[in-house]
Amino acid sequence: MAFLYTKATKKKHKKWYNTTFYAKFYYIKVMKSKNLEEALELWNSLQPLSEYDRHRLNKRFTIDFNYNSNHIEGNTLTYGQTELLLFFGKVNGAAKLKDCEEMKASDVCLKLSLAESQEKNFPLTQNFIRQLHRTLLREDYQVHYIRPDGNASSYTIHAGQYKTRPNSVVTRYGDIFTYASPEETPSLMSDLVDWYNLSEREEKLSPVDLAALFHYRYIRIHPFEDGNGRIARLMVNYILAKHGYPLLVVRSRQKNDYLEALHETDLDVGPAPSDGARATLTQIRPFRNYFRKMYANEIMFNVQFVKEQGPGVWWFDGEQVHFRTENSSKILELLSDNPNITYAQIKENIGINMSAIQRQLKSMMDKGYIVRTENGEWRVIITR
């Protein structure tokens, strides 16, 4: 693999220029600095992917997307619990039933949206968006709350139906930001879908800009009483997949930056929901810039994930993991090959003392890299 070393770089880092550590450090720095066009060019140069790499990417994306999209909205399942639930049908440790049902429904919606994206000759419809929402929420449910006068009250969240109550959000700065009213929502959603289908036919916007602008306009309408953020991120991948582009994960660790980009754009566009629902690409510049940078980083992660494989190379939630010692990687390989391996067998294979093994296993469990099921089997969550 070629690394982009310069003479100045070599002189500056002469002490560790030839080390593996420096190569990995500088390679990751260079990869993350790519702009969107360069990232897409690198991604396209890897095509077609092998069946093995497609399988690795699809599995990784399924876990990453569902975990992060739901975690942004407050779902409490861990990364490891998400993988166990989606691929083995059960979770390890304490987990709320509601969170488990939400995660499974999210995965169904992801599959549904990606399948629909391949129907190239069919336009987007409001019915499809409502179907996604109905699948995501599964059923109507009651929300109970205490009114300002101290009396208890409740209202119904409707699955697959546009909102019947006004909705708003308190920003991180304490402001109340109001979305489209229930009365104007149907016409604004009709306009949104009509605009999207026209944009598809005209092909004036790139798929990336189309996805970013759809996301922003949709969020400003906020057509449902719950689940709007998750639907927006599903629709982004529906649009990208429709054009054969790599898929996008909005990482929950970047939630504040993501919301801040939307907030900055709201300030530029103005508070009127109808203005937000018809915003232009020029008006959403802060969110567009953030979206393109985020997407470029995700594409470069995919490139690295495909290109960097081999002993000691591990990945977790969109990042490459570097261990301080080779023993951690050896332990993971042993657990992967033999889920029922004992501490004594690990010691025999690696040759370190029992307390060191226990410390490393605890550290990897605390970070979510591995879990131990109720029947004592090890599950390796971190990917190689």
Image: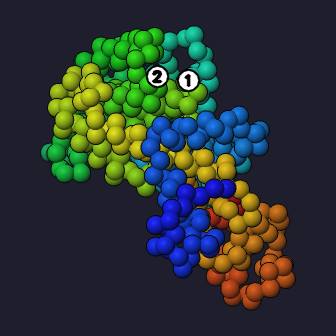
Question: What residue lies at 55% left-to-right and 11% top-to-bottom?
Answer: 122
Which image quadrant for residue 165? top left
> Which is more toward the observer, 127 or 259?
259
Question: What residue lies at 48% left-to-right and 37% top-to-bottom?
Answer: 37
Q: Secondary structure at mark 2?
A: helix
Residue 383 in picture, x, y percent from top left: 67, 57
Left or right placement of residue 213 versus residue 184 in this view: right
> Which is more toward the observer, 140 or 54?
54
Residue 371 in picture, x, y percent from top left: 66, 65
Left or right placement of residue 370 versus residue 270 in this view: right
Label 2 packing within 10 angstroms: few (<14), some (14-19), many (20+): many
Three-letter residue code for mark 1: Lys
**Eye-nearest disc, 2 or 1:** 1
Left or right placement of residue 343 versus residue 190 in this view: right
Question: What residue lies at 76% left-to-right and 39% top-to-bottom?
Answer: 50
Asked whether disc 2 touches disc 1, contact meaning CB atoms under 8 Å apart, the reply is no
Left or right placement of residue 8 versus residue 147 in this view: right
Is residue 306 depicted above or below 178 in this figure? below
The residue tagged 1 is: 242
Residue 257 in picture, x, y percent from top left: 34, 50
Disc 2 versus disc 1: distance between alpha carbons? 15 Å
Which quadrant, please, contains the N terminus? bottom right
Is residue 364 depicted above or below 131 in this figure? below
Question: What residue lies at 85% left-to-right and 83% top-to-bottom?
Answer: 348
> Which is more toward the observer, 127 or 241?
241
Is residue 1 depicted above or below 353 in this figure? above
Which quadrant, please, contains the C terminus? bottom right
Three-letter residue code for mark 2: Ile
The residue tagged 2 is: 129
